[in-house]
Amino acid sequence: RSSAARLLVPPRRTPSPPRNHNPIPPHPNTTTITPHTPTHTHSFGRGTGNTMAKKKGKAGKGAAGGKSANAPWKAKLAMISQIVSSYRPQKAGGTYMKETLPELIKQIGYQQKPVAELIKAQECADGKRFSPGAPGERKTRGLAFESWLRKNAPECGLDDTFAFQWEGLSEGSGVVAKKDLKKHARFIRIPRKLMITSTQASQSPIGQALMKDPTFGTMPNLMLAVHLMFESLNPESFYAPYLAALPREFSLPLFFTAEELNEMEGSPSYYDALKIQKQTLRQYVLASKLLGDRGGLAAGLKIPTFTYRDFRWAVGVVMTRQNRIPGQQDPSKSVLALIPGWDFCNFKDGEVATQYNDEVHASESFTMEDVKEGKQIYIYYGKRPNSKLFLFSGFIAEDHKSDYVEVLFSDSDTKSEIAKIRGMMLGARRLLPSLQPFRIDMKGAPSSICLTWCRINRASKAEAGTILKAKTPVIEKLSDENEKLAYSLVKENVQAALKRYPTTIDADRKFLDASKEAEKSGSGLSPNAVLCVRLRLKEKIALEMCIKHAEEVINGAGTAEAKGK
């Protein structure tokens, strides 16, 4: 399980509040660090098949297998390269069409065996790096990291306000209080000089070469992953103690088998999980070609041997730990960064309590609550639903206040005589007439903009006139009749979403109960598959609650306002 996951929004300047300001007391020269979901749904999934199709050249020194062009896995890699190149999205009018879910399921299933064979063949190069560690090895590496942190960041707070606990926590490892801490007490400060940034990645010799490629040049997170991978392969790296302390495995869908991912059938996140796997393999193949071409971008560079597991591990680290901090040359522009030490803090619902202090050039984090000595210090990753925590952090939070499930809404009533007027009213609010995603919270309440969409799509001519005069993005209840029709549309779409799951809520609950018993005996589903079932169960419960509430409104027994209370 990954310890923490933070992908942060572009920083915002914050004024200096009074001493007892709530929620946190930032320094006058600080920038708030606010964890959030990835800017792109598939953070490592941009680009099309054309990029690799155009990259041709003989694999030489440094090709994903390193020093020898005759690496034992060369044939396996060539086969995967052909498979990946065959995944060419179809074009329609010069625009690439989005792959369908069945297409992705087929692709991931087809590539699973060749990828497993490649990993097996590459064990001669990376076997030691990914072999199960001896008992206590994680703690030993953690203690070495602590020594590195003390030496290079003596004012970070280690041994004074916080300590690391490498074993015995439900999350695996984490950060605990060294003494009693009051709410909003600063417990950690990590200087910029210890961070690994996307700027460093692009300015490194390999980074400068990769920046010439259109895919790598436009994806700082991918550049950071490749830079991190090569740093981890360099035993003389300044960051070696930090990189050695990081987990070698993650409970991210990126690492799941096709069978484990099948447990997500029906979930809106199923597509995203498949896409991440597909694109990560594509980018590995691309990196192998670019860095293995003697006369290409890597000409004159000494490229260490790297494998698919090396690449995937680095993507997993960046996916779960990347943050945005102000750029050094231009603070108005943010850069991606890994923040050693702070990134071992685990998640808990609360408030964003981390900031970047321009005056001391460091990130600082404050407690969200009073913390007793020896108890774990948590941080809040921001308003991210469980679907995003699952995809990019590898866990699901219980009783998560920011959780929701996304449903794709459509309207079959497209032949109405006022369909064009409805479309115009939706367009004015930047809403699509069909295939529009909306959020349903975990209590089953549709978002206000979802209800606006439904009310507009069921508005009469007279009601349309009222909407046309309105200057607000959200349309409140128009009439009892419209409200019933709007909630009928909600029910229709949510029921359709619920039917996509192959199992019932009761079946999932029984399954999870049986899995707990089976776990005691060492049998049953893998932890990854159980995580998928837990996610889909939460989603289905929310959808079922939404249907029940919609029926109450339709039957005149409930209202949106009552539900909100």
Image (cartoon, grey):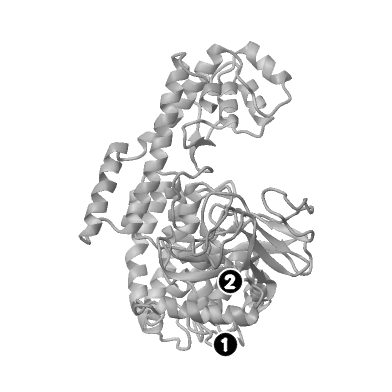
Give the residue at mark 2.
Answer: 340
Between 282 and 38, the one nearer to me in the picture: 38
Residue displayed at 47% across by 51% down = 272
Q: Which mark is residue 302?
A: 1
Counting from the top left corner in percent of width and height, residue 281 is at: 46, 66
User: How crowded is the residue under tag 1: few (<14 C-alpha within 10 Å), some, or many (20+)?
Assistant: some
| Left or right position of 450 against 19 | left
Mark identifier at residue 69: none
Give the quarter of the image for residue 332: bottom right
Vertical relation: 67 (above or below) 326: below
Q: Is residue 282 left or right of residue 194?
A: left
Residue 541 x/y as whole percent: 39, 36
Question: Callout 2, which amino acid?
Answer: Pro
Q: Position of residue 518 (x, y in %)?
A: 22, 55
Tag 2 near tag 1, CB within 8 Å? no
- Quadrant of the snapshot with the N terminus: bottom left
Does the image show residue 88? no
Q: Earlier in the sequence, mark 2 or mark 1?
A: 1
Q: Secondary structure at mark 1?
A: loop
The residue shown at (66%, 26%) is: 424
Q: Position of residue 207 (x, y in %)?
A: 63, 76
Q: Residues within 10 Å of mark 2 (few under 14, many from 20)?
A: many
Rendered position, 331 above or below 208: above
Pick the residue in front: 285 or 255.
255
Q: CA distance from mark 2 to mark 1?
A: 27 Å
Q: Is residue 471 above or below residue 396?
A: above
Q: Amino acid at mark 1?
A: Lys
**In this rendering, which labeled residue sits more in front, label 2 or label 1?**
2
